[in-house]
């Protein structure tokens, strides 16, 4: 059974930083691209960032480019999202998501989702 | 960037058919995927690549895609189908885009 468990969310002041983690199990982690997708309270879904199997291909939404950094440790089956210079607009539930393919350049879908971790940016 | 347009809400009586549309420019040339999200839960993939159903998804869920509109059809609607549904397309060249979501209410 595929399991994706996010952690690291919480309350942070504007301008602050947080690091999210996602522990994966139930599949061969280093064979699949991984994503972060977020959902602001009462809003829709928004792609945040993607990383290929080995980390050689990385993508960011324009809204987070230059502030967020995605990474993965295949030896620990763990995905990360370092979030800096946070603003209230970054307030959302952040989902760790397993992609259908190993490369984000292949048109595909989000196969499995974690339960999400809430990030609240407020003073 | 590419825009996907969904109706905000659809209402349907139990046992009837719900149709949720997802509009986009020449969306028929893209692969469309659909997710179901119940309150307080993570999204779940219900249809991939226009019309494929993942394992465990009832046959009542089906999809189609042509021209400028993709459609998710839920046949013989049950109370448990009440949820928000999102369409999605994309890849690294065009970003991954979601529709705004459609809330399905079972009357």
Image (cartoon, coloured by chain):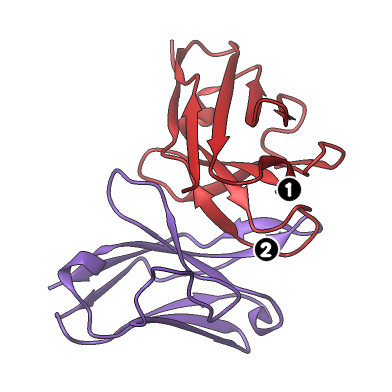
Chain colours: A red, B purple
Q: Please tell me which residue is depicted at 67% across the width and 37% down the height of the picture.
A: A63
Q: Please tell me which residue is depicted at 76% across the width and 59% down the height of the picture.
A: B94
Q: Please tell me which residue is depicted at 59% across the width and 46% down the height of the picture.
A: A27
Residue A103, position in %: x, y? 79, 53
Circle 2 sits on which residue?
A108
Q: Is B47 in front, or is A31?
A: A31
Residue A46, position in %: x, y? 56, 47
Quick check: B43 above or below A63?
A: below
Circle 1 sits on which residue?
A31
Task: Measure the alpha-carbon separation of dots 1 and 2.
Answer: 15 Å
In this rendering, which labeled residue sits more in front, label 1 or label 2?
1
Earlier in the chain: of badge 1 and badge 2, it is 1
SS at mark 2 in the image? loop
Q: In this view, does A91 lie to the left or right of B15?
A: right
Residue B59, position in %: x, y? 36, 82
Quick check: A66 above or below A4?
A: above
Q: Quadrant of residue B88?
A: bottom right
Chain ID at mark 2: A
Residue A43, position in %: x, y? 41, 47
């Amino acid at each position: 059974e595929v399991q994706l468990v996010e952690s690291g969310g919480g309350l942070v002041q504007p301008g602050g930083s947080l690091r999210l983690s996602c522990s994966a199990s139930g599949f061969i982690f280093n064979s699949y691209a991984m994503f972060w997708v977020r959902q602001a309270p009462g809003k829709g879904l928004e792609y945040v960032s993607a990383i290929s199997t080995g980390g050689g291909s990385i993508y960011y939404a324009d809204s987070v480019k230059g502030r967020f950094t995605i990474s993965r440790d295949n030896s620990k089956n763990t995905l990360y999202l370092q979030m800096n210079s946070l603003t209230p607009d970054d307030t959302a539930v952040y989902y760790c998501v397993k992609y259908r393919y190993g490369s984000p350049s292949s048109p595909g879908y989000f196969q499995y989702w974690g339960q999400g971790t809430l990030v609240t940016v407020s003073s | 960037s590419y825009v996907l347009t969904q109706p905000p809400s659809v209402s349907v009586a139990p046992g009837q058919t719900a149709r949720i549309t997802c509009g986009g420019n020449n969306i028929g040339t893209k692969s469309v995927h659909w997710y179901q999200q119940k309150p307080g839960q993570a999204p779940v993939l219900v249809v991939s690549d226009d019309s494929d159903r993942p394992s465990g998804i009832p046959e009542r869920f089906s999809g189609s895609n042509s021209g400028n509109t993709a459609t998710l059809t839920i046949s013989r609607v049950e109370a448990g189908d009440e949820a928000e549904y999102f369409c999605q397309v994309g890849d690294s060249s065009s970003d991954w885009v979601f529709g705004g979501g459609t809330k399905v209410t079972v009357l």
